[in-house]
Each structure stands twice: as C-alpha cells, then as structure tokens.
Amino acid sequence: TDAVRTPRLMGTERFRPFVAGGLAGAVEVVTTMPFEVTKNRMQLAGANKSHSMVSSMAHTISVAGPAGLYYGLQAQMVQVCGKSAIRFAVYDLIQKNRAGSATDLRLRCWRH
C-alpha cells in the first residue's frame, strides 16, 4: 500500500495553521465588516443623529449599494488575515513544543 500512496508536497503540514488562521481572519472580516463600517459612519455623523444600526445600513445600501458596507475591505483583509495567520501558526508551534522536554528549547518544526 505504500507504493499507491498519493504524493504529498513536502512540509505542507507546517503551513496548515498559517493557512487556517488566514482563512479564519477572512471569515471574520467578511462577517463583521458591514457592522464596523456602519458603526464608524454613525460615530462620524455625531451625537445629534439618532438612527438605528439597521436604518444606517439601509441608507448606506441605498446610496452606495451593498458594496458600500464593505468600504475598506482590502486594507482590513491584509491586517486581520495576516495577524490571524501568525497567531494561529505561533499558537500551534507553542503547543507542539510544549509536548516535548522542558529543557529542549529548540523549535522542532525547524529541525530537518
């Protein structure tokens, strides 16, 4: 059965936490961005405006379309996806190294 194994790219398992973190960050941005944009626009409108979140979202959609709720998406994706990817990768690295000896401080994933 060893001869019929599907070939795998060498070392791809090292990047799984990094990729998972980036994808988690992307999902976070896509789901929260409309609320963040609306919150910021409500704050910039000032205290004299007393609109609800829903009415503010509806106004943004009527003026700029649904894409208006995702204003600044690219910058937010770069920031959050990068931060989340690094966080997941470092957490995984720490967890893998905790399983070993306390005196062995070398990072196992960097050994060849």
Image (cartoon, rainbow, N blue to C red):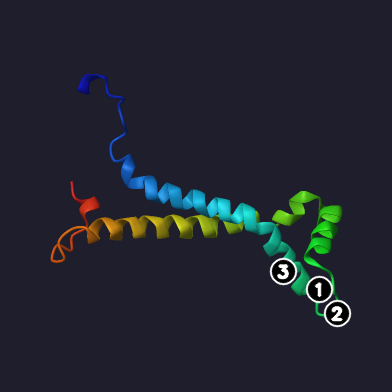
Which mark identifies residue 45?
Answer: 1
Decide: is 43 above or below 95. Answer: below
Quadrant assignment, res 70 = bottom right
Whole-angstrom CA distance, mark 2 to mark 1, is 8 Å
Decide: is 40 above or below 18. Answer: below
In the image, what residue occupies the spot 23% across and 58% down?
Answer: 97
Task: Specify the farthest residue to the bottom.
Answer: 47
- Crowding around mark 2 (Cα neighbors within 10 Å: few <14, some 14 to 19, many 20+) is few
In the image, what residue occupies the spot 37% across and 55% down?
Answer: 89
Q: Could you say whether the residue bearing mark 1 is in a helix, strand or loop?
A: helix
User: Could you tell me if the residues under marks 2 and 1 are in contact, i.e. CB atoms within 8 Å?
Assistant: yes
| Kind of residue at disc 3 | Asn
- Residue 61: horizontal and vertical position, in percent? 82, 54
| Kind of residue at disc 2 | Asn
- Crowding around mark 1 (Cα neighbors within 10 Å: few <14, some 14 to 19, many 20+) is few
| Kind of residue at disc 1 | Ala
- Residue 18: horizontal and vertical position, in percent? 40, 50
Which mark identifies residue 48?
Answer: 2
Whole-angstrom CA distance, mark 2 to mark 3, is 15 Å
Q: Could you say whether the residue bearing mark 2 is in a helix, strand or loop?
A: loop
- Residue 10: horizontal and vertical position, in percent? 28, 36
Closer to viewer: mark 2 or mark 1: 2
Q: Left or right: where does residue 108 sit relative to residue 73? A: left
Q: Left or right: where does residue 93 sit relative to residue 54? A: left
Of callouts 2 and 3, the N-terminal one: 3
Decide: is 41 above or below 27. Answer: below
Quadrant including the N terminus: top left
Q: Could you say whether the residue bearing mark 3 is in a helix, strand or loop?
A: helix
Q: Left or right: where does residue 47 sit relative to residue 104? A: right
Q: Which residue is mark 3?
A: 40
In the image, what residue occupies the spot 33% across and 40% down?
Answer: 12
